[in-house]
Amino acid sequence: MVEGKIKDATKILNLLRSLSDYKPHFEIVGNYRLIDDGIRPEATLMLRANGREMHEAETGAGPVDALAKVLKKSLKSIFPEIDEVKLIDFSSRIFDPGAGTAAGVEVEILFSNGRTPGV
């Protein structure tokens, strides 16, 4: 049941993003960077929200955890409720094994708000 809710939420977000008057709450400036040495992955990103530009870095138990942590760290001052959001699972799927880049990979990340599983 949770998987259906996730797919529905993704569809709704994609629909909202396609509307001409859609204004994102934040935007990633440039590309995020991920350094994964196999021991202590580190993610760095720059984002813009509410007229402010933020540049943060964070480490994690793995690359997805590092990315989730740096995003939360960047947004916490504007959206304090994000502190309740937790990474609970992720999966990845390789579309083009010959590409050798992230362009051929899809990652599905599952978060929880601490009250509703998988939401």
Image: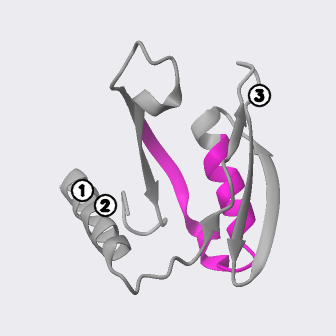
24 left or right, relative to 98: right
Q: Estimate how packed mark 2 is, as few (under 14), some (14 to 19) or many (20 or more) residues with alpha carbons within 10 Å.
A: few
Residue 97 location (% of width, % of height): 39, 15
Tag 3 residue: 40
Amino acid type of disc 2?
A: Thr
Tag 2 residue: 10
Q: Nearer the viewer, residue 96 or 89?
A: 96
Identify the mark nearer the N-term, 3 or 1: 1
Residues rendered magenta in the picture: 66-90
Identify the mark nearer the N-term, 3 or 2: 2
The residues bearing labels 3 and 1 have C-alpha atoms spaced at a distance of 31 Å
Q: Nearer the viewer, residue 30 or 63?
A: 30
Find out whether the residues at labels 1 and 2 contact each other: C-beta distance under 8 Å.
yes
Tag 1 residue: 7
1 left or right, relative to 16: left
Residue at 63 percent of width and 32 percent of height: 62
Q: Quadrant of residue 60?
A: top right
Q: Estimate how packed mark 1 is, as few (under 14), some (14 to 19) or many (20 or more) residues with alpha carbons within 10 Å.
A: few
Question: Tag on residue 33?
Answer: none
